[in-house]
Amino acid sequence: ERIQNVVSEYKIERESKILPTGIPNHVAEVKKGQKQLFHNQLYKGFPIKKKKHILLYVGRVVKEKNLDFLFPVLENAKKVYPDTILLIVGGGPELEPLQKRAAELKLSKNVCFTGYQNRDDLAYFYKLADVFVFPSVTETQGLVTIEAMMTGLPVVAIGEMGTVDVMQGNNGGFMVKNDVTEFSEKVIELLSNKELHKQKCEEALAWSKKWSLPDLTNTLVEYYEEAIEIRKNR
């Protein structure tokens, strides 16, 4: 909608429609028999143990992603579930500063930085986690939240910029203010309430279908056909 408003500001007065960027279905696919093998390798390489509560972030590790916001969220979650792990998947210039900050806060044992990972492997991380946490306040689209939902992973995200357009409220998780306390409460609620977690997992799968590449391609074809008819009749 924000881009649609920009188009309007350019004094283009014709009807416009919004078509989100589609996400291919294979983003959520894991190879048969590979899931447990991948997770076992992850347990060996990083301080992640089975049956721990895992909060996951996937994306670029850069300042504008607001990732240090997640450290006090982790500290609050640890008060209820001391075994909680924050798993940060991705690379970028803020990787080392965040590692140092985690050490200063004595969170090194509870924060795992994997660095850059192959895109084809991201589904295995989504399948491992309990909650996808997204603190960015500068997203243009925020499509990574939809990728997480496509695997059935509920999301807690700050309702700013593109995230608002994608989640449109508490669809597939919780969209909260830029507030550590509120963010933490929703994370802990999902970790504590199995029924709510199951409900949000199902909701995430259903909501993410709106961004399925095949479905959006059909809509794109409809828009082109409509545009052709308008041109013919002009």
Image (cartoon, grey):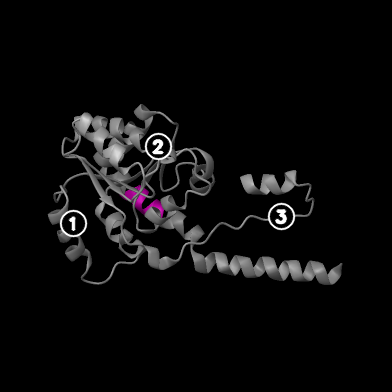
Residue type at mark 1? Leu
Nearer-the-camera pick, 66 or 221: 66
**Given contact means CB atoms under 8 Å apart, are the residues at marks 2 and 3 in contact?**
no
On the image, which quarter does residue 41 sit in? bottom left
Q: Earlier in the sequence, mark 2 or mark 3?
A: 3
- Pick the quarter of the image with the C terminus: bottom right
Q: Earlier in the sequence, mark 3 or mark 1?
A: 3
Tell me, yes or no, whether the highlighted magenta stretch contains residue 188.
no
180, above or below 65, in the image: above
Label placed on residue 16: 3
Coordinates of residue 94 in the picture (x, y in percent) = 35, 41
Provide the secondary structure element on which disc 1 rests: helix
| Residue under the point 18% across and 63% down | 36
Start and end of the magenta stretch?
A: 198-204
Provide the secondary structure element on which disc 3 rests: loop
The residue that label 1 is drawn on is 42
Coordinates of residue 26 in the picture (x, y in percent) = 39, 68
Nearer-the-camera pick, 57 or 220: 57
Residue type at mark 3? Ser
Q: What crowding class fits label 2: few (fewer than 14 Cα within 10 Å), some (14-19), or many (20 or more)? A: some
Residue type at mark 2? Asn
On the image, which quarter does residue 74 sit in? top left
